[in-house]
Amino acid sequence: MSCLWVAAAVLFAVKIIQKAAFVFQQCRYQKRRLLYWLKEHSFLFHKYLLAHLFLWTVFFLFRQKNILVIGLCIEGLAVLLWRRLEDDRPAITARMKRLLSVCFLLVAVSAWGCSYHFAAMWLYALFFPLWCWILFFAVALLLTPIEYLIKRCYVRMAKQKLRSLRTLKKVGITGSYGKTSTKQILLHLIRLEFNTCASPASFNNEMGLTRTIREHLKPRHEVFLAEMGADHVKEITRLAALIKPSIAIITGIAPQHLQTFGSMEHILREKMQLVEALPANGTAIINMDNPYIRSYAIQNHCRIIRYGIDSADVDLRAVHVKVNHYGTSFLLLYEGQSIPLHTHLLGKQHVLNILAAIACARTLGISWDIIRKRVAQIPDVAHRMQLLCQRDYYVIDNAYNSNPASAAYALEVLSQMKGRKIVMTPGFVDLGDYQKEAHRTFGKQIAQCASIVILVGRHQIQAIYDGLLEACFAKEAIHIATDREMAFTILRRLVKSGDIVLIENDLPQVFNR
């Protein structure tokens, strides 16, 4: 009986701990963010917990151990089957293996310890869902010192490897948006002239870059492109100390991760630490169209290259920017030269990314003839203003990690396209107290260019909905989907030939509430 009880407990715990692990991973292994998620999403558990408490109150009336075992097995299987379609499986990294192993071991041990007394078994089952979440958080807390030591060891190895590559040119790229696109564009511009290693995908935190250095960076590489992300203070400072770049690119700064940063002042100061950390002979490349960057007084006396579209006091400027279904054309002004350029990428945001990449390529010695040719051949950057043809209509896929600034750029591009316009979005996350205001403004912006809106989620979309109505958008043209599958079902029903669909952000289901 005890063995069956333990097996039932482990079975029941699988989905609960899997969900906790997935959320923890989406929260970047930060316990404070996990607690915030639990606070914001506690309502999701209310109905289930009421049903669970009622069920186990009924089981208590039988006062038989075998009934409790059968009940735990049935509920465990029900939870397993009920949530089998949810995309909530965490990536099984070495850290996640350690975390899950300890969790399931403690579930088994605690279940075994309660298996000898009916009252203990009943109380254990009654509070089991809550116990699994508490246990997971406690294990994550317990393993923190171990994970820190492992992390420091890997970082130390990465630093040693970088020190051994004395001729390596290192480029650091940061910003609230545009980091990955700029990195991919720059890689395309220089890859034939320089043997280049770029951090893959969005490996932009300390462990991601450490892994890139240890596994991908080789002695043959001449240039290292390091994308640097941050969602709390001191992170860019640590990344700059790890990489020690000689070139820094700041793509743009916008409200993002305000929940962890606390204020825009902290975001601005942290991102600009990449510039402040440059050596005296280093080069900073900054976006002067961004009001936050423009307002920042750089203390470093390194070389500064400024670029922009709307700003005139810059070294590289794009003017006459035109967008259509075939891409974007613009005129580049640089040191008295006027250079016409065309790219398959869409919109001003990508033009700014291209300007940053060109400035860096020129710093590395790439000729204008090569740059002009390669700008025309830049491939799409997946999920970042990517234009896709779907039978007889177009989709602008801007599904990666949106924020108010990048969303505004996307809507500007949408407004310049011909055809009926549909916007599908779950909104933004991690904006703290600013989130409702940002969503309300976003709703008003959507109303200026869209004919149909599909909002994805439950409660977090309410401010977008309110903003749409405040802008006198037709209520019957707003469609609500509880999840992405339902959203695409609605889209397939509504879309017509010649339509333009903007998919703005694609939050993990765990953040849609």
Image: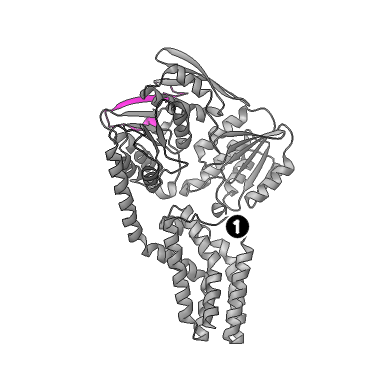
**Which quarter of the image is occupied by the C terminus?**
bottom right
Whole-percent x, y for residue 500 in the image? 66, 33
Is 199 covered by the magenta stretch? no
Q: Quadrant of the N terminus?
A: bottom right
In this view, which residue lies farthest toward the top? 336
**Colour pattern of the rendering:** one colour
Q: Position of residue 168 (x, y in %)?
A: 32, 33
Instruction: Work out whether 358 lies above or below 456.
Output: above
As displayed, is residue 326 above or below residue 267? above
* Closer-to-camera residue (360/61): 360
Q: Where residue 39 sits in the image (x, y, percent)? A: 49, 60
Q: Residue furthest front?
A: 220
What residue is rendered at 40% in x and 32% in y? Answer: 196
Q: Nearer the viewer, residue 285 or 155?
A: 155
Q: Say which residue appears at 27% left-offset and 39% top-offset.
A: 164
Question: Where 150 falls versus 296 (above or below)?
Answer: below
The kind of residue on which mark 1 rests is Glu
Q: Which residues are magenta?
A: 293-313
Q: Is residue 126 visible?
A: no
Residue 297 magenta-highlighted:
yes
Residue underneath mark 1: 86
Q: Is residue 339 left or right of residue 477?
A: left
Placement of 90 over or under 478, stated as above or below: below
The reply, left or right, for residue 185 in relation to residue 82 is left
Q: Quadrant of residue 134?
A: bottom left
Where is residue 44, by image quadrant? bottom right
Tally of numbered tags: 1
Q: Residues within 10 Å of mark 1 (few under 14, many from 20)?
A: few
Q: Is residue 477 visible?
A: yes
Q: Residue at x 50, y 61 (%)?
A: 20
Q: Where's residue 498, x and y in %?
A: 71, 31
